[in-house]
Image (cartoon, rainbow, N blue to C red):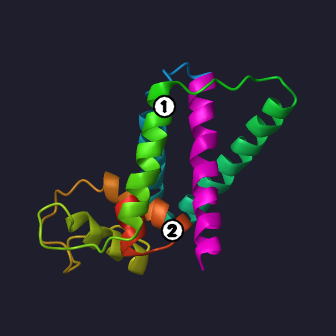
Amino acid sequence: MYFLTLLRLVVFLLSVCGYAKLVESHFRINRRLKWIVTFSSIILVIYLASLCGFLLPSVWLIAILGIGISIYYGIAILRKKIRLKKLDAVALGMLLYLLLFGITLWQSPLLHYDNFTHWATIVKFLHLNNTLPEQTDAIIGYYDYPVGSSLFLYYFTTLVGFSDGSMLLG
C-alpha cells in the first residue's frame, strides 16, 4: 500500500517538476518563484476546465503533459544539453524541512473544528461530484468562496490518493 502511494506521489512530483522546469527555462522566472507560478497556472487551467465541465479529465491531461515535459527535460539532462543547478544550503534545508513536515502531516488526522478546514469540505465535494459546487448545492453556505486552493488539493489528491493525510500534505 505504501509503495503505491509513493509511486503516485512520484507521478505528482514528475508532473509539477516538468512544469516548473518549463516555467524556469522558457519564461525566465526566478527559480524561487517558479513553484508559485507553476501551482497557480495549474489551478487556473483546472478552474477554466471545470467551468467547461471537464474537471477530472483536465487533472489527468495536466498530469500526463507534465510527466511528458519531465521526461523531455530528463532526456535533455542525460544528453548534457541542459545543466542541473546545484542545490544551495537554503534549498537543502527547505527540502529536509519539507520531508519531515510531510511525514508528520501524512500521519495526522484532519480536524474540522477551525475556520480553515472548510477547504476540505470543498475538496470532498469535488471528489464526490467531479464538478464545482453551485448555489443549489446544500454543502455550500456561502457563495463567494475562492476555490483555488481546493482545486490544487483536488489535483494533488486525485493523483496521490484521497485521504486526510494527503489533503493536509497537499
- Can residue 54 be seen here? yes
Q: Is residue 17 above or below residue 57?
A: above
Give whichever of 21, 168 is nearer the camera. Answer: 168
Q: Which residue is mark 2?
A: 158
The x and y percentages for residue 130 are: 44, 73
Q: Residue at coordinates 36% horizontally, 73% vertically from top-left?
A: 164
Magenta run includes residue 21 = yes
Circle 2 SS class: helix
Residue at figure coordinates x 73%, y 47% from the top left: 68
Numbered mark located on residue 91 in the image? 1
Q: How busy is the neighbourhood of tag 2: few (under 14 within 10 Å), some, or many (20 plus)? A: some
CA gap between label 1 and label 2 equals 27 Å
Q: Amino acid at mark 1?
A: Ala
Position of 44 with respect to 160 (left or right) is: left
Residue type at the position of mark 2: Thr
Q: Quadrant of residue 81?
A: top right
Which span is picked out in magenta?
A: 1-25
Q: Is residue 100 magenta?
A: no
Tell me: residue 133, above or below residue 87: below
Left or right, 71 with reference to 90: right
